[in-house]
Amino acid sequence: MEYIYPAIFHVNSDGSYTITFPDLPGCVSEGKSLVNALSMAQSALHQWIEYLTDKKQEIPQASNMEILKVSDGEFANLIRADVRDESAVRRTVSIPKWMDELVATSGLSLSRVLQDTLNVRLPPQR
């Protein structure tokens, strides 16, 4: 699922950045350069949403950028994170007995082979 939240970038005296998310209290990151800060902001947002999802907590609605207040030395920017549910699910699959025997003796993980194959065969996900 795609999430887009506004972030406030505070420019520090050494040229680094401190990033906060007004809608996600406690979600804070830092970056040494603007490029690094943007990457760190995306990573922080991704991890924060994953944490809320794992803990089954409500994910707050994102604020409208137009209502954000920024101080001197700050600017607002939208940050996007694509968070997918990576939890494992059990599926029943059927394969020929001879193939199952070969898999068992080869040391292959049938789950890993299936995941690898599906990653190749399915269209790329955003």
Image: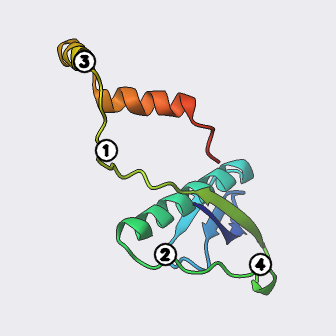
Residue 10 in the figure: left or right of residue 49: right
| 3 shown above or below 98 | below
Could you say which disc has been placed on residue 26 in the image? 2
Structural distance between the alpha carbons of marks 2 and 1: 38 Å
Instruction: Decide: few, some or many residues near mark 2? Use Cα within 10 Å; few <14, some 14-19, many ≥20.
Output: few
Of label 3 and label 2, which has the lower sequence position? 2
Could you say which disc has been placed on residue 91 in the image? 1
| 99 shown above or below 23 | above
Structural distance between the alpha carbons of marks 4 and 3: 54 Å
Q: In the depicted view, which residue is nearer to us: 1 or 54?
A: 1
Q: In the depicted view, which residue is nearer to us: 5 or 126?
A: 126
Judged from the image, the secondary structure of the residue bearing numbered disc 2 is loop
Of label 3 and label 1, which has the lower sequence position? 1
Structural distance between the alpha carbons of marks 3 and 2: 47 Å
Structural distance between the alpha carbons of marks 4 and 2: 19 Å
Of label 1 and label 4, which has the lower sequence position? 4
Could you say which disc has been placed on residue 103 in the image? 3
Instruction: Decide: few, some or many residues near mark 3? Use Cα within 10 Å; few <14, some 14-19, many ≥20.
Output: some
Of label 2 and label 1, which has the lower sequence position? 2
Q: Callout 3, which amino acid?
A: Val
Q: Callout 2, which amino acid?
A: Gly
Could you say which disc has been placed on residue 65 in the image? 4
